[in-house]
Amino acid sequence: MADALYQEGLAHAHRSEWGAAATCFKRACAMDPDSPAGESLKMVEDIQAFYHKDQFNP
């Protein structure tokens, strides 16, 4: 089940659906702490936290 959630999270990430991807990765980590979903979750959180200051100050 954890692997299926990980794969679903990868599919969401591929479509840039970061919130849905993070949810799947979190659920996969809860089921299997050794899952690669932990590293994927960290990457998705980094993407969500990134912003370019110049975009907000034209």
Image: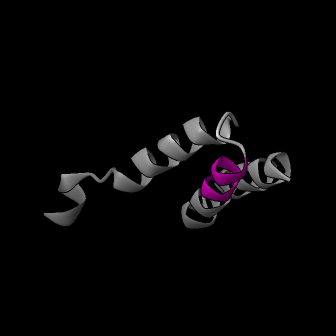
- Main SS of residues in magenta: helix
* Residue 46 included in the magenta stretch of the image: no
Which residue is at a point 34% across and 53% down the rendered structure image? 49
Q: Total of numbered circles in the picture?
A: 0
Which residue is at a point 75% across and 48% down the rendered structure image? 6
Which residue is at a point 48% across and 42% down the rendered structure image? 42
30 is higher (above) or lower (below) than 37: below
53 with respect to 28 (left or right): left
44 with respect to 23 (left or right): left
Colour mode? one colour
7 with respect to 49 (left or right): right
What is the x, y in percent for residue 18? 56, 60
* Res. 4 in view: yes
What is the x, y in percent for residue 12? 70, 58
* Res. 58 in view: no
Q: Quadrant of residue 36?
A: top right
Q: Quadrant of residue 56?
A: bottom left
What is the x, y in percent for residue 50? 33, 50
Which residue is at a point 85% across and 52% down the rendered structure image? 4
Locate the C terminus by quadrant: bottom left
What is the x, y in percent for residue 21? 63, 58
The magenta stretch is 25-31
Q: Residue lying at the far left in this picture: please name it.
A: 57
